[in-house]
Amino acid sequence: MDYSKTLNLPQTEFPMRGNLPTREPEILEKWEKEDLYSGLMEKNEGKPLFILHDGPPYANGDMHMGHALNKTLKDIITRYKNMSGFKAPYIHGWDTHGLPIERQAINKLGINRNEVPVSKFREVCKDFALGYVENQKKQIKRLGSIGDFDNSYVTLDPLFEAKQIEIFGEMAKKGYIYKGLKPIYWCPDCETALAEAEIEYCEDKTRSIYVKFPVKDDKGVFEGLDKKNIYFVIWTTTTWTLPGNTAIAVNPDFEYSLVLLSSGEIYVIASGLVESV
């Protein structure tokens, strides 16, 4: 006997099982057929704008968990705003320039960039990036995220590049752009400059030493003392810089002590270091 038929259970059209692998694609297909995003924008026309600037991911591979989290959070925010009295368009974008795309194109396509003309290499990278734009676009839709996918932006779009050049030109005319000298990190393998965020430092224990420097010009401070026997004592952990030292610096806010040794030498030491030395 089926005892479930003897119970007064609530009646609902919802299935007892979620069956998400089947149901989710059906729901997403329904949204696409209804053009849910365009209908939402039309419904909210005339309301105050809420603009979310989508920081674009690199188009150099499939989406990972970081992308999924990022896109889902942004989708939640824009949906909430669209239901809270705003018009919140969501324009997805992709960064299609830069070293990450070049490196992935070289690795996955087996290209030796030194044997390929620059124009050809750029074309290969462009095709590679645009291919992953389409891949990621499908994956974002599969997450249930909505937006104006038909008008997504990519940084290699000539109109996008022209706008960047226009803004750079305005900055140059206003004097915001200047040329200077600055040390940069260089990757010998990638043969390109590296950003600070790409630098990893190796933890290396170093020895600290004390070094005495003879006084050449006391500026009249050590009047009455034999200047040939007076030395400034410094402490350093960057021992490899010593061959290049040509001077030392003293701090006008520090107190210094004159320490007479049994050898007759006089050391000038910052008071806080006297006991250490």
Image (spheres, helix red, strand yellow):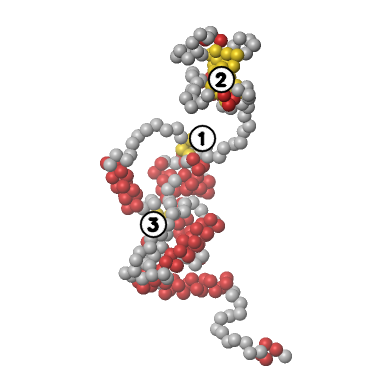
Tell me the SS state at disc 1: loop
Give how far apart the Cα atoms at labels 3 and 1 are. 33 Å
Q: Is residue 60 above or below residue 183?
A: below
Give how far apart the Cα atoms at labels 3 and 2 are. 66 Å
Nearer to the camera, 229 or 253: 253
Provide the residue designation for mark 1.
Answer: 188
Classify mark 3: residues with Cα within 10 Å, few (<14), some (14-19) or many (20+).
Answer: some
Provide the residue designation for mark 2.
Answer: 257
Badge 3 or badge 2: first in the primary sequence: 3
Q: Is residue 32 above or below residue 118?
A: below
**Which numbered disc, 3 or 2, marks the residue closer to the eye?**
2
Tell me the SS state at disc 2: strand
Q: Residue at x 50, y 21 (%)?
A: 248
Q: Quadrant of residue 17?
A: bottom right
Classify mark 2: residues with Cα within 10 Å, few (<14), some (14-19) or many (20+).
Answer: some
Tell me the SS state at disc 3: strand
Estimate the x, y position of residue 169 in percent, counting from the top left. Answer: 29, 44
Give how far apart the Cα atoms at labels 1 and 2 are. 48 Å
Classify mark 1: residues with Cα within 10 Å, few (<14), some (14-19) or many (20+).
Answer: few
Estimate the x, y position of residue 117 in percent, counting from the top left. Answer: 41, 41
Q: Residue at x 63, y 24 (%)?
A: 275
Estimate the x, y position of residue 59 in percent, counting from the top left. Answer: 47, 53
Provide the residue designation for mark 3.
Answer: 153
Q: Is residue 14 visible?
A: yes
Name the amino acid type tagged 3. Answer: Tyr
